[in-house]
Amino acid sequence: MNEQQNIEQQVQEDSRISFGMLFKALKKHRRLFYKVLSVTFVIGCIIAFSIPDYYKCEVTLAPESSSSRGSSSLRALASQFGLGGGAVNGSDAVGPQLYPDLMKSVDFKISLFQIQIHKKDSTRMMSYYDYLVKEWKKPWWSDVFSAPSRLLSSLLSKPQSGNITDQHQVNSFMLTRQQTGVVGMIGRNVVCDVDKKTSVISIEVTDQDPLIAATIADSVKVRLQDFITEYRTKKVKVDLEYNKKLFREAKERYEKARQRYAAFSDANQDLVLQSVRTKLTDLENDMQLQYNAYSQLAGQLQVAEAKVQEETPAFTTIQGATVPVRNAGPARGKIIFILLFLAFLATSATIFHKEGLLKPLLGLS
């Protein structure tokens, strides 16, 4: 008691707190540190080792601009058929900066549901959806906190029949609660980033199994390429189908006109009547007109086919998917250290408060 009174008296005389005074106060209550830090260490170990290991796999791609690769050659092809340069001018509808937004779309995430995967230590195949629903490990406190909501949901929800992962049962407009949860998990596990300077696409997949992380990363890369290709070539493919339709119709009209001209010419080969010659000239002119239209549409069809190839994006794989050897986390040592540091600060603040040093230390009156 005398020591504490001396400390308080010294604090009243001098508002400045020395390091020796603080150390003396902490040393006096060192047994409290032993108890608090020991309990904190045990709790930290329980928390750190309750978090499952996870692995990361990264894939990087470099997109090539399809419009710049051969736009001059495409304009040259169009000019041969008298179409002009304006028929082939255009810009990309989707740039690399929008690729992460495409991957965040619900439709893209739903397309990953049916990817067939298996764990590194197992050969049993399953869909990615079933893996996230049935095999994904969570910390024990997650089940504890979510138990009331899951119990309430099971009482209120109607039983579902059939395989929920069938594509015809997945409606992106109206997802079930479970499907919405899986979409959210995919959004957290699969991340896409684009370097604004180099336009390099980075796809990072986090998973609790190293083989599944690499499998999903490679599958996402392929599906992203297909998704972007379909998105960018959708309009030019519609134009191509329309040009094919016009070409077929022009070809049929030309063949009919040619057959009419040939049939009339053969039937009236020995006649020299002016009416016959006039009719023959009309048929020949009609056949020539149909041929000119047929020839021009054939050129337009070639340009449309070249346009599809021109708009198809090309990707260069800089880094492919590789099964990670070491886990990326959790950083258990860092978790335990942070908890011990916070416990040390809280215990020190409590001791300073008991010794009457906290307010002067904080500069409070």
Image: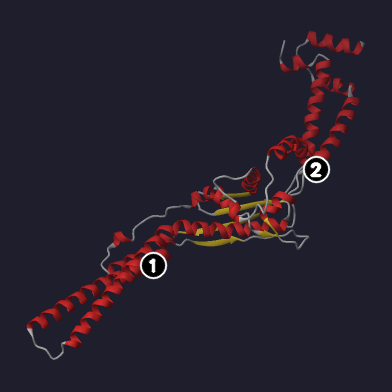
Which residue has dot 2 on it? 50
Residue 68 showing in the rendered view? no
Does the residue at mark 2 contact the one at mark 1 (Cβ under 8 Å)? no
Image-quadrant location for residue 120? bottom right
* Residue plotted at (52% across, 51% down): 99
* Picture coordinates of residue 131, whole percent (x, y): 71, 53
* Picture coordinates of residue 197, whole percent (x, y): 50, 50
Left or right relative to 308: residue 264? left
The N terminus is located in which quarter? top right
Amino acid type, callout 1: Ala
Q: Which mark is residue 150?
A: none
From the viewer's side, name the closer residue of 204 and 103.
Answer: 103
Amino acid type, callout 2: Ser
Left or right relative to 303: residue 328? right
* Disc 2 residue crowd, few under 14, some 14–19, many 20+, Cα 10 Å: some
Which residue has dot 1 on it? 306
Which element is circle 1 on? Answer: helix
* Picture coordinates of residue 204, whole percent (x, y): 63, 52
